[in-house]
Image (spheres, rainbow, N blue to C red):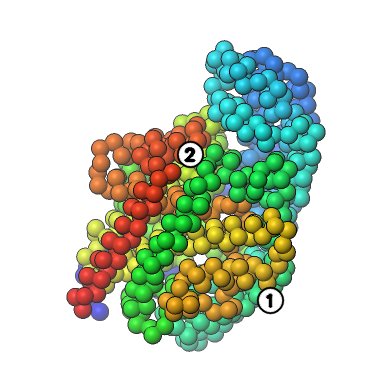
Amino acid sequence: MKKTVEAIIMIALLSAGLLQSQTRERAAVPLRYTWNLQDLYATDDEWRKEKEKHAGQIPALSALKGTLSTPAGLLQGLKTVSGISKELVRLANYSSMKSDQDTRDAGYTAMRQEMSQIFTDLQTQTAFLEPEILKLGRQTVETMIRQEPGLQDYKMYLLDLFRRNEHKLSEKEEKLIAEAGLMAESPYNIYTLFSNAELPYPQVTLSDGSTVLVDQAGYQRYRAVANRQDREKVFQAFFASLEKFQRSLGAALNGQIKKDLFYSRARNYPNTLAASLDENNIPEAVYFNLLKNVNDHLPTFHRYLNLRKKMLKVDQLKYSDLYVPVVPGLELEYTIEQAQTMILEALKPLGKEYGQVIEQAFNERWVDVYPTTGKRSGAYSNGDSYDVHPYILMNYNGQYNDVSTLAHELGHSMHSYLSNKTQPYPTASYSIFVAEVASTLNEALLIDQQLKKIKDDQVRLSLLMNHLDGIKGTVFRQTQFAEFEWAIHQRAERGEPLTGEVFSQLYGDIVRKYYGHDSGVCLIDDLFRVEWAFIPHFYYNYYVYQYSTSFTASTALAEKIIAGEKGAVDQYLAFLSAGGSEYPIDLLKKAGVDMTSAEPFQKTMAVMNRTMDEIEKILAKK
């Protein structure tokens, strides 16, 4: 196929040696492609020294009991606890990221466990704090805030404490809850260690004669190969390896659900969903409206699936066809340097300072780029170390999706960077509900920039489908996960058993509904029902729905920014800088999006249909 010069510049058809796409040993990765954790602590020994120092301050916190009844005393108590917490979070981030570099390293696993114990000690020693504040009464505390200017930094925390007063317990009960934290992380830790470090993933031989390891990183890469038989082989091998251990993996997930159930009942919530949403004051209607809106628009999703089927020229679309590029013979692969250039260009509408910080991230080793043996799968941004820059973990494989993922995580990092820079520590941390707005808005600007720059129809088709794939993965797939999460928690609340087989049955029923299995839109093999065992987010307690709500919010905001609407960028940057200074629904309203209405979702569906219309116009030319 003949390509324009512009397309050749934007696409790089790279050799495997340049692309560096497969899992390798960490020692073989050039230093510039690894994150520099020395910005947190120069050495493990320094970490240990700081750990001993700050952990040693915890027992003395009990002396604050009975000193909070004056404005000065309350401020001193909150500043002391907050200061120690800030340092402990930094210590925990170092240990967790060191462990994520190589989940096989027992030393760093032990460091993570140490921090878990220390946080439990902190909660136990400060269990008196909130009950004592609540005894003062809301009116008294509001008066104290007016009298002591330093308490303004804690105003959001204090007033929210009274909002959730009915779910707070006595000092003795709070201590028991804190001690339970020693067990609380076990399900996730077991899952992470087993799935990343010990599960025996298979190798398969592809049609070109190459033998590849189908671990989590390998699965995510080779599920997109062009040869359909190879994809089937990769899917079958990967999910068969999970199915062999679905009972053990099911026991781990059941432990997580029971943990959620314990905390919701201990704090007198009607159900686990209410307990989770109440933390950020999110109405339950937002969750259920999302499920309803997505289910009502499954025909739109099926239109996308039928387009994929048409472009792949297959008689029957299968689950293993969902990740392969739809334009044959077109290799959309990028080096990490090309990805950086593309992202910087795409994010120019957000201003010079925004771009300068992104360049810092690239040049000063904020990002751990490539998949390495034992490294945690997936990608994330960690911006919780208030006095240090954010960090990004990637498993970069050189596909457009990886470029988009890097832009996504940089959105999180910029949100953390601006919040930490602008807000005092008590209000710097933003809620999960708004966390995905910055990330998905970056993705929207990236795809918009690419589509404006590239005129070649084949390349445009590929990028337009990538955009649809993003909507599929973030709105429909994450809501599918959310529906599964709601179903399994409901089952636990009814006292019904949850085993690996039960998880597979429930998950299979939902995924087949979403993908139109019974009507022949996309066939789902029985084996693939075990996909739930591949999704770490089910251990995050109703996290996934926020990908979908945030995506619809960011779509509405991106439309304003792309259109050059006056004040849109300033409002958006103010939102990123606001941290947790207000409730998330209120922050988004100030940015220009009302998440209690259907408008953000409707705008997202309009963008999706508009994209499919353009694809059909291009296809009609042929």
Alpha carbons under labels 1 and 2: distance apart = 42 Å
Quarter of the rendering containing residue 303: bottom left
Q: Which residue is painted at 78% across and 36% down in the image?
A: 173
Q: In the image, residue 397 lies at what x, y percent?
A: 47, 66
Q: Which residue is painted at 62% across and 34% down in the image?
A: 164
Q: In the image, residue 460 lies at what x, y percent?
A: 27, 67
Q: Quadrant of the N terminus?
A: bottom left
Q: In the image, residue 208 lies at what x, y percent?
A: 47, 86
The residue closer to the viewer here, 510 or 418, is 510
Q: Is residue 82 left or right of residue 220?
A: right
Label 1 SS: loop
Q: Is residue 10 left or right of residue 284?
A: left
276 over 616 or under it: above or below: above
Which amino acid lies under the numbered mark 2 shown in the image of this protein? Pro
Q: Which residue is painted at 42% across and 76% down in the image?
A: 521
Q: Quadrant of the C terminus?
A: bottom left
615 over 445 or under it: above or below: below
The residue closer to the viewer here, 537 or 281, is 281
The residue pinned by badge 2 equals 584
Q: In the image, residue 41 lies at what x, y percent?
A: 62, 42
Q: Earlier in the sequence, mark 1 or mark 2?
A: 1
The residue pinned by badge 1 equals 244
Which amino acid lies under the numbered mark 1 shown in the image of this protein? Lys
- As drawn, the residue found furthest toward the top would be 147
